[in-house]
Amino acid sequence: MSEVKSAPELEEILTKVKIPGEIQLALAEIEAGLKKQESDQTKANNEPRLTLYDFDSEFGRRIDLEAKKLADSGIDPNQIASALVKKFDLRNYGIGILLGEGQTPMTESPTLRRLIISEVLQNGESNYAKNSPEVMERIKNNILRWLQIPEEYQADFIFATASDGGTGSGQTCVQTLLQANPKISKIALEKKGWPGHKAMAASQRVDLNEKEIGFVAKSEVLPAYQIGPHNQTGIVHPTGLWQQRAKTAAKNKQMVFLDHAYPGFAHAYQLLKDKPYTQIMEADYKRFIAPFLEKGVTTAISVGPTKAFRTFKNRPGGLSLIYCPDQNIKKILAGVIRARGSAFENTSTRALLHGLDRYMSYFTADHEISLRRVAGAEDQWRKYSKDTPLAKLFVAGEFAGIFRNFTSKEGAARTLYGHRLGPVASNGNIRINTTGLPGNKEIAKADVTAFASVMADD
Ligand SMILES: Cc1ncc(COP(=O)(O)O)c(C=O)c1O
């Protein structure tokens, strides 16, 4: 894994906010502690503590029984995976966050942690004043530049941020578009997708139209298109499909919701071919976003900071960017944000926003580390799954991101548990978090072989 790179030093921030001397001293200690934590974690990730155990069918059977009991108690497959990993010390392929080579969660964005400390110290000074239209405009434009969205579109974007990560910014987008077009009574989405979209439809009391993966929404529905790799399969749709989706939306005067929970992930593999980071982001823009903007489609993009910058623990709000030449939507968005609870009332979101305003390059450095981990792990899977049925899920450019999902053979979960592997298993499907792959080559190869052995033939 790459070393944790540059992040603004607390001192640097503090020189700008005139913190008294004794607090400066306390902060220097916090800063030293943060640095130690980061270097300890990098070390832990580079020195995997994992052991390769022999296959144990009895152990597998015991865990499988426990899994069934948990399922009967009504908890969902993700929670079951998490409980089993903890209780039986399985290797963690089930969790939904980025893991390092030692199977421990990757370091939380060091940039955000430092900015949060600085925010907490300033809370007494009422920072609401900092939330001015000028500041929001500057942040919006920084984010658009990060996403490589050309300047010509800037004026027609509106920007807001609500609480609760990419889930919150997604809700904001969906609620705004539904209110802007009361005729819409259905959300259309791909099957095997992220369950949160279904929950959003339910909470808005609109029907669901669950479609094939790669569908083009034609009728009067609000399409929830996941851009980047599709969670949970990892499929990256070709440029042609995005152009077709945009063309159809423009023809039918349809609004679209683009969920961008994994910015850059679809093209991260090109980093390993020495493509610069900005070109990865540009490739994402051209494939997923440009087709809609070029056709003038009203497009709400929810950008999640959770996976990109690694903000799992502190969980700042996500970023809702709505491209709309129609000014009415602006008022609706303001109302939705008022109801949801917004950015500047929440310390970690405020820290994120101030960082995006003043320290964007530090966040892009954090982001590049995430992308390199995903791309590096993917490359290992590609190598070890060669000549197995699993190989087709690791074709660069066609599949990407932290998840893969496949139909499994009868008894697959039991076999995997016997190998001490903890994926998410449900309804004859296995979902793997690819970043669970350990750095130890012998263990990694054995794990990939075990997963390949339980994949159903087509
Ligand atoms: C497609 C998709 N959208 C949104 C989210 C929610 O992201 P967050 O954890 O930032 O709320 C996820 C999380 O897994 C996701 O996969």
Image (cartoon, helix red, strand yellow):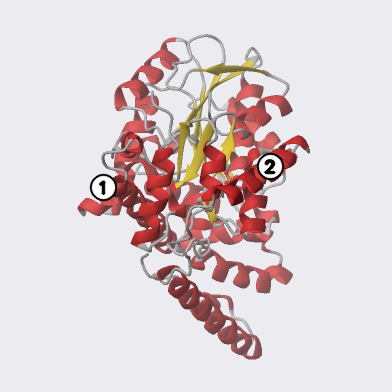
Q: Where is residue 381? Give x, y as percent.
A: 34, 48
Q: Residue at x 62, y 81 (%)?
A: 19
Q: Give the mark nearest the N terminus, 2 or 1.
A: 2
* Badge number at residue 65: 2
Give the number of the mark in front: 2 or 1: 2
Residue 29 falls in image quadrant:
bottom right
Q: Could you say which quadrant of the image residue 284 lies in?
A: top left
**Rendered location of residue 273, percent (x, y):** 21, 51
Disc ID at residue 270: 1
Q: Are marks 2 and 1 in contact (CB under 8 Å)?
A: no
SS class, disc 1: helix
Q: Quadrant of ligand 1?
A: top right
Alpha-carbon neighbours of circle 1 within 10 Å: few (<14), some, or many (≥20)?
A: some
In the displayed structure, would residue 384 be above or below residue 323? below
* Position of 172 relative to 373 (above/below): above
Position above or below: 272 against 123: above
- Ligand 1 closer than 8 Å to label 1 CB: no
Q: Is residue 394 left or right of residue 174?
A: left
- The quarter of the image holding the C terminus is top left
Q: Report x, y in % for residue 321.
A: 51, 38
The residue type indicated by label 1 comes to Gln
Q: CA distance from mark 2 to mark 1?
A: 42 Å
Inspect the image, locate mark 2, and give the three-letter code of the amino acid beneath it. Leu
Residue 183 spot, x, y in % from top left: 64, 12
Q: Which quarter of the image is occupied by the N terminus?
A: bottom left
Q: Ligand 1 near label 2 (Cβ, under 8 Å)?
A: no
Q: Report the front residue among 1 and 20.
A: 1
Q: Secondary structure at mark 2?
A: helix
| Relative vertical location of residue 453 with respect to residue 238 in this rendering, above or below | below
Visible in this render: residue 275? no
